[in-house]
Image (spheres, rainbow, N blue to C red):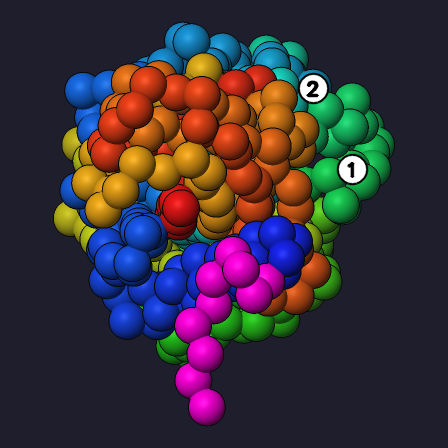
Amino acid sequence: MTTKITDANLDSNVLDNTNFNIGLLGFKMAVNEGLTVFNLVDGVVDEFNDESGTDEAEGSNDTYCGTGDFYKNQGSPISYSAGFTTTTITEPDTSTAGTNPDHNVGTFGSFTVPANLTSLSFKMWGGGGGTGAPGAGNGGGGGFVSGALGVSPGQTLYVGVAEGGNDANDNNEEAANTSPFGAAIGGTNGRYDPGSNPGSHGGNGGGGSGIMSEQSIANYPAYPGTRGTVPAPSVYAVASGGGGGGSHCGGSSPNQEGQGGGGGGLTGFAGGEFGNCYAQTIAAPSHPQAGQGGGQAQSGGGGDQEQGGQGGGNPGEGEPGGFMFGGDAFPGRSGSAGSGASKASGGGGGGYYGGGGSSGDPGAAPVHGLHGGGGSSFYGHPQITGGATTGAAKVEGGGVADPAYVAGTNEGFDATNIGPSNYPGGGIGEDGYVLLTGTACGATTSTTIVSNAFTSTSVATSARIVVFQENIDTPTLNTDVIASVSRDGTNFTNATLSDSGYVTGSSGQRILTGQADISGQPSGQSMRWKLALANNAVKIHGVSLQWS
């Protein structure tokens, strides 16, 4: 039997509940069927798929999100793009430049997270390795890392940008500790030995680029002396540096000497050798073990996620890499093996765990000084999502195909066809680069959303409204979210909203319901709803209006 539901056979509470349920049913049908407007008898449902159901001329500050199909009471998004070199920045509103820190030299750059920004994308390139001379081996390219870091407004991030590894003739600066050599995160060097021929020294490893917290900066290791301790959880991400190329093999021909290990990837590459100066040819394996070259010297191994690369040994020991630093190369010794005896070893590249420094052979000339290992990159912090990394391809650094790549960044020095007559001191690896980008929601603002007019079949005296709403902040109903209804299209009466529960589960989108007595308004058949939003940000996904 079919019975018509009227005021005569239902009490007012049952009738109100029935009408609300009709509105919710209409809402459900609208959502499931993907309709913008679903017409009911004496009612309308507007589930937002576009802006066709609202009067933009009457509304104010009503920002519509077309990708999520909702209105919100926030201003237009603000985009940020902050680039960092070793000493410069591109966005002074959020950033300060560093002075290229390296083991207690200089300062890190900084980025202050602006209001309403909760996720920051990063792309970082490490530094390339330098080379020695003459007849030097190539420096290894730096690594590349990217991802998204969860952040809080007002938080300060500290940014270290890698310096490329210095060439052989710059190593004498280490003694005074007055100039970076493979900054910012731990690239070290082919050591200087006073009184010997500087033209025969190995190259420095390239530094790593990194994002760290203030806690990390306070504990950043000092050099020379103790390496110090950096709390691992406060290191967010690191792009590795390439190992320094060793020199020399006693010849004056163009490069025949091999390759500093490329920076990782999650694992750096060991230094590799090739050419006619060595009894053995190896390929630059990707592991922490040292690579064996000709004679008695060894190249440094690559760093990984748990340990630094092994230092080359037998008999002149290179230093292993460690957490946030690359290993020093064997410092050499004076002797009768020629003016460059054992001063030819390449240093390890910096990184999360740095590459090992190479050893030298202090035997009879020609001197064998091999190549530093590459460091490892890192994106394993729990606040990072979507992390990825690309290792170097020998001299070429990782991430060169990325659209944001800056020319002249993160390659090792290519010593091919560079002989002692035209480049006696070797060459310097390219610096790294750091790019931070993000989009912040605009500030919360007072917003009014007004519907188009809907013609009723008679003059209504009461109205019921259902609002499909989602919290961004924590709003107070009837203060931060106020609903009202008009029957003449101009005058509005507030409806007292109550929370009728979430659509699914215990969070996300919820249903707000309310009713209003509109009998005191001027007579009319032009039905409209209005929402006034203030103080706390919300999303409005749709509105259902019924009248009788």
> Which residue is disc 1 drawn over?
230
Element marked by disc 2 = loop
Q: Is residue 235 visible?
A: yes
Q: Is residue 211 left or right of residue 456?
A: right
Would you identify the image quadrant in which residue 223 lies? top right
Q: Nearer the viewer, residue 213 or 472?
A: 472
Figure check: 342 above or below 83? below
| Image coordinates for residue 464, horizontal then vertical, percent | 48, 44
Q: Which residue is under mark 2?
A: 104
Q: Residue furthest bottom?
A: 1
- Hey, what amino acid is under mark 1? Val
In-front residue for pair 341/217 = 217
Say whether residue 435 is visible.
no
Magenta highlight range: 1-10
Q: Position of residue 418 (x, y in %)?
A: 20, 43
Mark 2 or mark 1: which comes first in sequence?
2
Does 519 appear above or below 548?
A: above
Find residue 53 and report its image quarter: top left
Q: SS at mark 1?
A: loop
Please give the name of the residue rendered at 43% of the width and 84% of the height, measured from the top-left corner.
2
Secondary structure, magenta segment, majority class: loop
Mark 1 Cα shell of 10 Å, populated few (<14), some (14-19), many (≥20): some
Q: Position of residue 290 (x, y in %)?
A: 60, 68
